[in-house]
Image (spheres, rainbow, N blue to C red):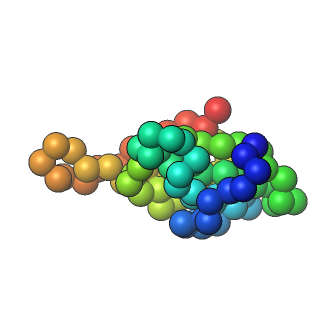
Amino acid sequence: MPEYLPVAKQVIAGSDGTVWLRRTGLYSDGEHDVWTVFDPTGTAVAAVDVPHGVRVPDANRAYAWAAIEDEIGVPYVVRYRVE
């Protein structure tokens, strides 16, 4: 863990009681966001790395749903498994 963490840019209340915090700037390349996942007791249980700009409107401990645009700007929904 770094000594200081960037400010949370987004918060999601997971459908299973988890809380997801999106942060940018944890990677030197600046191309990824990190979602830190907390269980209902407040314990960090996962860190999910996604490309910068991918919208994650819903998530739980098993899956994260994302909205992604293709090359011509058409949005589509993708379900990622959280491991």
Q: Quadrant of residue 41?
A: bottom right
Q: Is residue 76 left or right of residue 42?
A: left
Q: Is residue 57 left or right of residue 60?
A: left
Q: Is residue 40 left or right of residue 59?
A: right
Expressed as whole percent of the image width and height from the top left, the position of residue 53 reads 38, 54
User: Is residue 51 visible to us here?
Assistant: no
User: Is residue 78 visible to us here?
Assistant: yes
Expressed as whole percent of the image width and height from the top left, the position of residue 33 reads 51, 49
Q: Quadrant of residue 82?
A: top right
Q: Residue furthest left?
A: 72
Quadrant where the C terminus sits is top right
Expressed as whole percent of the image width and height from the top left, the position of residue 47 reads 66, 43
Q: Residue furthest top?
A: 83
* Residue ID at (18%, 52%): 74
Quadrant where the N terminus sits is top right
Q: Is residue 5 above or below residue 83?
A: below
* Residue ID at (74%, 61%): 17
Of 64 and 52, nearer the camera is 52
State how many labels appear. 0
Of 16 and 57, nearer the camera is 57
